[in-house]
Image: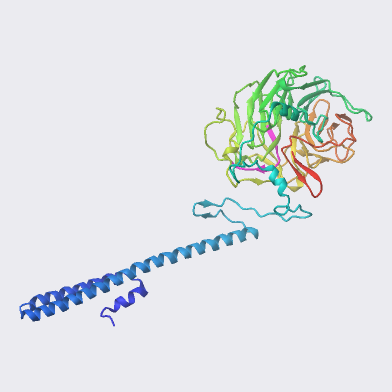
Amino acid sequence: MSRYPNVDLFEAQGDAENLEGVASSATHEVDMISSQSRGMFALTAPVGDIFRAKIEEAYQKRRREMARVIRTWRTSRAIRFLVLTAILATTTHVIVSWSAGAVQSGVVRQTTVIGGERLVSVEPLTEQNGELCLPEPVGADRQLVASLLPQQSGSAGVGASSTPSRPSEALRSEVAKRKPAGTIRDPRNAFASLVVDPARNEVIFAEENNFSVLVYDRLENTPPRAALSEPKRIIQGENTYLEFACGVYVDPPTGDVYVINNDTLNWMTVWDRNARGNVKPTRKLHTPMATFGIAADEENQELLLTVQDDHAVVTFKKNAKELEGPVRLLQGPKTRMADPHGIAVDRKTGLIYVTNWGTMNERQPGGPPRFGHALWPIGRNNNIPGSGRFEPPSITVYRKDASGDVAPLRVIQGPKTGLDWPTSIAVHPDRGEVFVANDTADTVTVYRTTDNGDVAPVRVLKGPKSMIKNPTGVALDLVNNELWVANFGSHSATVYPVDAAGDPVPKRVIRSGRPEEPAPMLGNPHTMAYDSKRDELLVSN
């Protein structure tokens, strides 16, 4: 048994201070023996030599023993570090597994941070009902896949591709002459939005399918047997700066027409009331991407525009042109705007009403001004990852001079409201009523201007007699007390008394196609897929 019992216990206890004590004790004893030995050297030399050799042997033996103890201590420290790392890794795996299980079971949790990675959000897939298209097995059609891959260079071996040479002009010309095997296209005009000009007895349509503006007589009524009604004037062509026209406003004093483009051309165009054909606009104004609705505050000579993608309302001077910037911006999470579409001004109360489809994400403020304007909406590049969500459709109400990130005065939202893709809105200031066109519900719902919360409409227009089909525009003729609806889904505009309800027969109908010809409902198609199981094409608009 060792003279130093603490050395035997050290490896089990892992006590560094114990080790230092052992080392100090051993050194002290060696020094004591060495001191004693120096005193004994006065004895006979042979005895002294023998004793000194013994002392030296004992000293070296203790040094070797201490070196072994120190090595053992260092090794045990490395082992403890490896064990601790393994424990941490196991704990992390358990936490992540528990978090995934919590998400699948519907438990709401906070963002989990693991090391340098950041889990932003996880949403479980909803239950899938009905038939599904199963993916083809791997290698089901290798020839088809191979035909889509770049041609391989024979000399370079597998994996190396050569850039194909440019086709000859003769081949390119031949390809350009090819006719498609089939075409799906709506040749008819699709009424997206409308405005009534009672002073000149006209109604003006923003037409999205063929990139045009159409002007009809207000009293036009397409006969039942007629194919369509021809407009009085058409503005259309490459010089017009019109593409996917979705919003329209008419200036009461002059009859000038203001038109909003929604997607590919970020310009608002202004036309003289007599303009027709492929002509340049009187003036144009650069607007944010995905601008949709337009309303005017005639008292202050301002135009208010909704911006879908940026969840905002921007205000310009009515006579602004070219690259002039907004004078006011309403944007931010407090506004509760979510994919805003329609907008209307109540000239009696000084309030604005905005319809929201409900798709929403949040933006991080900051960065240089966009297009050199401090009041330009914060763009999609500032999206906060994981902030996207679907809110119920709504109507949000603000003061017409509201700016910044301010909360609405009132919000109409909830299952009782019947709102479903509320695309257009109009206010009747004298009746105190708000009219909303619900695209996917095939309805026009009417509310009081003072409504708030989850309230049912006071009236609903819907049914086969009404001919309301995918309404995307609603307008009021305050002079003649008429309600106008633009039906994107049936090539028509229908007119009703302002107090109509239920399933009313229209007073008049303007059609751009035969009633038996259904609208393909193609509007700015982006992507397409083929369902091989049902032999169908799926088109997103």
Asked if residue 452 lies left or right of residue 515, the reply is left
Which SS does the magenta portion mostly show?
A: strand
Tell me which segment is drawn in magenta: 351-362
Q: Quadrant of residue 474?
A: top right
Q: Quadrant of residue 240?
A: top right
Q: Position of residue 164 (x, y in %)?
A: 64, 35
284 relative to 7, above or below: above
Q: Residue furthest bottom?
A: 1
Q: Position of residue 70 (x, y in %)?
A: 30, 69
Q: Position of residue 464 (x, y in %)?
A: 89, 40
Residue displayed at 74% across by 55% down: 128
Q: Is any atom of residue 439 visible in this view?
A: yes
Asked if residue 70 lies left or right of residue 51, the reply is right
Number of marks in the image?
0
Residue displayed at 8% across by 80% down: 46
Q: Position of residue 508 (x, y in %)?
A: 88, 29
421 relative to 329, above or below: below
Front-lying residue, 107 or 540: 540
Asked if residue 34 lies left or right of residue 449, the reply is left
Q: Quadrant of residue 64?
A: bottom left
Q: Quadrant of the N terminus?
A: bottom left
Its colouring scheme is rainbow
